[in-house]
Image (cartoon, rainbow, N blue to C red):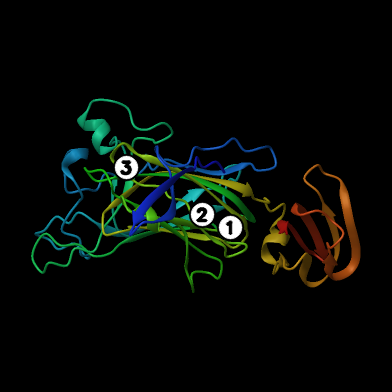
Amino acid sequence: MKEKIFTLFLFVLIGGSMSLYAQVLNTGTGVEWGTLGASEPLVLDEDFQGFEFFHSDEMPNDGNSSHSIDPISNDTIFGYKNDTVEAAILGSCCTTVKYYYYQCAFAPEWKTAYAFRDSTDNTTNVSDGFVEISRDYPYGAEPFTVHGWFVVDLRAIDFVEVIQWSHSSTGGNKRGVMCEFSLDDGANWDTLRYQPGNTWALSFTKDPTTGVKTSNGYRCDPSAYGMTWEDGIYTSNVMLRFAEAGGQTPRIHDLKVYGTFVRPTSSKEIDVEELNIYSFNKEINISEPAKVAVYNLSGSLVKSADEATTISMDDMPDGIYLVKAQAGNKLKTSKVLIK
């Protein structure tokens, strides 16, 4: 993950004494997308261009959609709706991830607002087409909207490593976005990235594996041309949720997910209850006794055991490992992060 960080020192002289203040301030159009290796394959590549147009405006620069509340009445055209869509995992004929939309609009061919206005291109890596998420606009009279969200259910992907994604704003700069994650089937959500409009001091990212929160100092000043983001996940059973940050309507243009998807090899393996593999405190845990093999990302076998439920990794360097486990006719292959 790449972030360009600039440190600005402000010297303030008060009453003859000097105080030193430091702030982190990033400029540009977000986090530059890095190049991932063969061990981090692309398993989902979505640009939202395959969706049916559903928006109350006719031009990208006209602002956010309006008149939200579902269900749609016979005599009113609403600008946001609820929907569920499935998208295929790359390399799979039948396994999908699910998108859950609550109060979202769709414009599969539109540019970003200012790229349309100025007859120029979007920011690099920001595609035409987007999902627009409604904001809370409770003025009690038409048009009004409610707080919306867009959930991406990645639980069918065995191990999610990195996500690359982009957003833009609805006809104005300095508008932000938030990405949340859940590791417990949507029961609880935590913030992965919070990027409010031009309030750099509140922006932060959070490491899902350690819980460490880090200020990143990005401002969303150029959001009307589009901004790109890259975030590490490095865990399994992942759900993502995108929403507004700071009260403005965001548009999600792209989502690329890198990780591991183990394609089922037989109906027998699909039908049986699968094993659960996870790591904690430099130890690999398996949900029931199994034959276990642990490989590094170079493909070398580094650990093996029979009838094991735990594998100690204290003597191994931190990093990502591939774990294969078999208990009777139950098979499971998963990546784990050891740190």
Mark 3 — residue?
Answer: 223
Q: Position of residue 173 (x, y in %)?
A: 26, 43
Residue 101 seen from this side: no
Q: What residue is at 23 percent from the left and 25 percent from the top?
A: 119
Q: Residues within 10 Å of mark 3 (few under 14, many from 20)?
A: many
Q: Residues within 10 Å of mark 1 (few under 14, many from 20)?
A: some
Which is nearer the N-term, disc 1 or disc 3? 1
The quadrant holding residue 324 is bottom right
Type of amino acid at the residue the image marks with label 1? Ala
Type of amino acid at the residue the image marks with label 3? Ser
Residue 31 seen from this side: yes
Tell me: 305 left or right of 148: right
Mark 1 — residue?
Answer: 156
**Distance of label 1 from label 3 (alpha carbons):** 32 Å
Q: What residue is at 69 percent from the left and 69 percent from the top?
A: 273
Type of amino acid at the residue the image marks with label 2? Val
Mark 2 — residue?
Answer: 97
The quadrant holding residue 147 is bottom left
Q: Dividing the image into 4 quarters, which one contains the C terminus?
A: bottom right
